[in-house]
Image: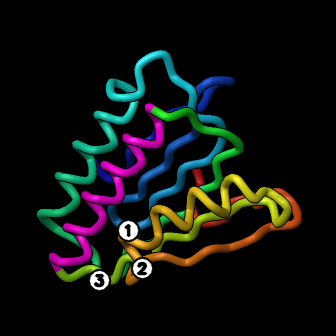
């Protein structure tokens, strides 16, 4: 598998994972009926990727909103990324949020404390379009 893609919906984010280029993008809302089932294929794709990591792995996350169960799943994604980082890939996580969104800035602060070697916060004044992967 070269690319892993989930088309977003009003309740789920778009997920694009280019395994060849080492680029993961998550964008949209994350309030699925069952977060564990929604994120399970992505966790599996990250496990597969961890056996043949690229020198650089870039993660772009721009979530308008996510619920508590999605937050737990995002943390599971970060744990997999930490393993990928330890396996020799320089992982960088870009957390995109609107500048005046204190809630998401605080949430990222909670994540980045545990993953500060990989973490980079990007405050966006406008919506960010990920130009890295073409579907």
Asked where in the image residue 61 lies, by quadrant, the reply is: bottom right
- When the figure is inspected, residue 124 is found, relative to residue 77, above or below; the finding is below
Question: Measured from the top left, where is residue 33 in percent x and y?
Answer: 48, 16
Which comes sooner in the sequence, label 2 or label 1?
Answer: 1
Q: Which residue is mark 3?
A: 55
Question: Measured from the top left, where is residue 42 in percent x and y?
Answer: 33, 42
Tags 3 and 1 touching, CB below 8 Å: yes
Which comes sooner in the sequence, label 2 or label 3?
Answer: 3
Mark identifier at residue 4:
none
- When the figure is inspected, residue 40 is found, relative to residue 9, above or below; the finding is below
- What is the chief secondary structure element of the magenta stretch? helix
Q: Which residue is mark 2?
A: 116
Q: Residue furthest left?
A: 51
Which structural element holds mark 3?
Answer: loop
Q: Residue at x 26, y 47 (%)?
A: 45
Asked where in the image residue 94 lies, by quadrant, the reply is: bottom right
> Which span is picked out in magenta?
69-87
Question: Measured from the top left, where is residue 46 in percent x and y?
Answer: 26, 53
Q: Is residue 73 magenta?
A: yes
Q: Residue at x 38, y 68 (%)?
A: 22
Calculate the distance from the C-alpha at mark 3 to the C-alpha at mark 1: 8 Å
Q: Residue at x 28, y 75 (%)?
A: 54
Q: Residue at x 49, y 62 (%)?
A: 110
Q: Is residue 114 left or right of residue 86?
A: right
Foreground residue among 30 and 56: 30
Foreground residue among 62 and 76: 76
Which structural element holds mark 1?
Answer: loop
Q: Is residue 84 left or right of residue 95?
A: left
Q: Which residue is mark 1?
A: 22
């Amino acid at each position: 598998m070269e690319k892993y893609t989930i088309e977003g919906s009003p309740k789920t984010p778009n997920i694009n994972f280019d395994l060849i280029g080492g680029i993961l993008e998550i964008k949209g809302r994350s309030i699925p009926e069952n977060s564990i089932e929604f994120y399970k294929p992505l966790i599996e794709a990250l496990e597969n990727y961890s056996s043949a990591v690229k020198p650089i792995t870039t993660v772009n996350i721009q979530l308008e909103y996510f619920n508590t169960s999605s937050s737990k799943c995002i943390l599971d994604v970060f744990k997999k990324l930490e393993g990928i980082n330890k396996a020799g890939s320089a992982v960088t996580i870009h957390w995109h949020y609107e500048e005046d969104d204190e809630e998401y800035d605080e949430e990222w602060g909670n994540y980045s404390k545990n993953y500060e070697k990989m973490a980079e916060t990007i405050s966006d004044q406008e919506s960010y379009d990920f130009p890295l992967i073409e579907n």
